[in-house]
Image (cartoon, rainbow, N blue to C red):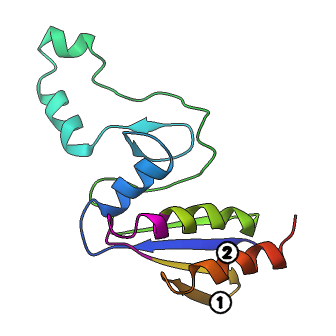
Amino acid sequence: MESTVRLYSSKIGEISKFLNKFFNTNEYILNSDIHVEDYNDKNKSNDNKTNNKKNNNSNNKIKNDNTINATITNVNKRTLEWEKNYRNPVEIADIIGALIENNDKYSINMWISIDEGLFINVTDYNADEIIRYLYERFPW
């Protein structure tokens, strides 16, 4: 059984900013092994390929980074929703805590599912109880 975290925002760039801070990176994350620069910046650099200085500074900011263990898809500056499945439900506690601690900085709503077909809205009022419940129900 996998647990799910869903993030929603009505403000462009909020989820990307939060995930960049949470996963400790400055680039837009596409998956656990590859980081790609913002789509608009990539297009600008492709237009300026004749400029040798830019070509020498690696227009393709694609690199491997094994420090991030998450599998994240379709996260870019314009993402308004994000979903991640976790095999171990206790891992959700980290992202819940990070979002609640920084709730004043980001306009993001979080929903989690630890039972199939049931989603819980994570708020300032229930976050502590949810984290406690995760550790009580899944003590491994």
Q: x, y percentage for residue 128?
A: 62, 78
Q: Residue at x 27, y 75 (%)?
A: 10
The vertical placement of 8 against 87, above or below, is below
Q: Which residue lies under the disc numbered 1?
A: 117
Q: x, y percentage for residue 9?
A: 33, 73
The vertical placement of 135 against 56, above or below, is below
- Depth check: give the residue in front, 139 or 10: 139
Tell me which segment is drawn in magenta.
99-109
Q: Residues within 10 Å of mark 1 (few under 14, many from 20)?
A: few
Query: Residue 131: which numbered mark, if any?
Result: 2
Magenta portion: prevailing SS class? loop
Q: Residue at x 65, y 90 (%)?
A: 117
- Depth check: give the residue in front, 19 or 96: 96
Query: Could you tell me the amino acid type at mark 2?
Result: Ile
Q: x, y percentage for residue 125?
A: 51, 86
Query: Could you tell me the amino acid type at mark 1?
Result: Gly
Q: Is residue 77 left or right of residue 89?
A: left
Decide whether residue 111 is among the magenta residues. no
Q: Residues within 10 Å of mark 2 (few under 14, many from 20)?
A: some
Q: Residue at x 23, y 14 (%)?
A: 55
Decide whether residue 101 is among the magenta residues. yes
The vertical placement of 124 against 86, above or below, is below
Q: Measure how far apart labels 1 and 2 are at the Cα level.
A: 19 Å
